[in-house]
Amino acid sequence: MARERPRRKPESAGESSTLRIIGGRLRGSSFRYHGDRRTRPMKDRVREAAFNLIGPQVVGAHVIDLFAGTGALAFEALSRGADSALLIEQHFPTARLIGRNADSLGVSDRIDVFAGDTFVWARKQLDSATSVAADRLVVFCSPPYDLYVIRTQDMVQLIRNVAQHCKSGSVLVVESDRRFDTDLLPDE
């Protein structure tokens, strides 16, 4: 009798788990994360440090999360007083999960999820997305780090375009690893 080999999980699969919001009105709330290796959630310590740096600038702002992944950055911003958020995520199952998490956190009326490629979105919708009624924007750019290597020019151009579209007093947070030359970032 032939023995059946156990099925291996696809390369992109991971263990489903939860992430938590670390500050603000929703502090301690958790939301689902599918564990997909393509999605790298920002560690709690790093997220806390980022929000300590931008502090009260998030209050009343409109948030744009260019590579939303788990949605943790936008959820954290909403918890800390942001008025609204636009999350862009190209992986459709992840985009759907962000929507379900927004429902469970009670913030679905304050977010929009765009399921598609960030670079395409920026070419077509950046103007309208940055002309929202909020006094300022908080924009997070925390892509898969390999994009900084594979698509360096596209990443630099994306960041420059976003910076040029930001209103005075806005904040642009860029996360990268050591492979990206931060001297390529705009001085604005």
Image (cartoon, rainbow, N blue to C red):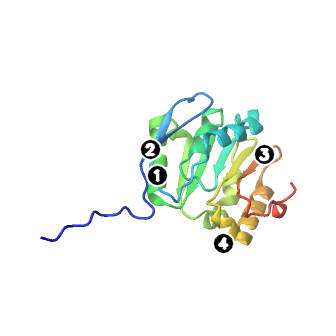
| Crowd class of label 4 (few under 14; some 14 to 19; many from 20; radius 10 Å) | few
Q: Is residue 70 above or below residue 52?
A: below
| Direction from residue 89 to residue 132 in the image, left or right | right
Q: From the image, tell me which residue sits under label 3.
A: 170
Q: Quote the CA–CA distance across marks 3 and 2.
A: 33 Å
- Where disc 2 sits, the SS reads strand
Q: Position of residue 123 (x, y in %)?
A: 67, 67
- Where disc 4 sits, the SS reads helix
The disc labelled 1 sits on which kind of residue? Gly
Q: From the image, tell me which residue sits under label 1.
A: 35
The disc placed on residue 91 is: none
Q: Quote the CA–CA distance across marks 3 and 1.
A: 32 Å
Query: Visible in this render: residue 138?
Result: yes
The disc labelled 2 sits on which kind of residue? Ser
Q: Which callout, 2 or 1, points at the residue further toward the start of the chain?
A: 2
Look at the numbered discs 4 and 3 and tell me whether their residues touch, using CB distance below 8 Å.
Answer: no
Q: Is residue 109 above or below residue 146?
A: above
- Where disc 1 sits, the SS reads loop
Q: Which callout, 4 or 1, points at the residue further toward the start of the chain?
A: 1
Q: Which callout, 4 or 3, points at the residue further toward the start of the chain?
A: 4
Q: From the image, tell me which residue sits under label 4.
A: 150
The disc labelled 4 sits on which kind of residue? Ile
Q: Which callout, 3 or 1, points at the residue further toward the start of the chain?
A: 1
Query: Looking at the image, which residue is at 75% across and 34% down?
Result: 55
Question: Which tag is nearer the camera, tag 3 or tag 2?
Answer: 2
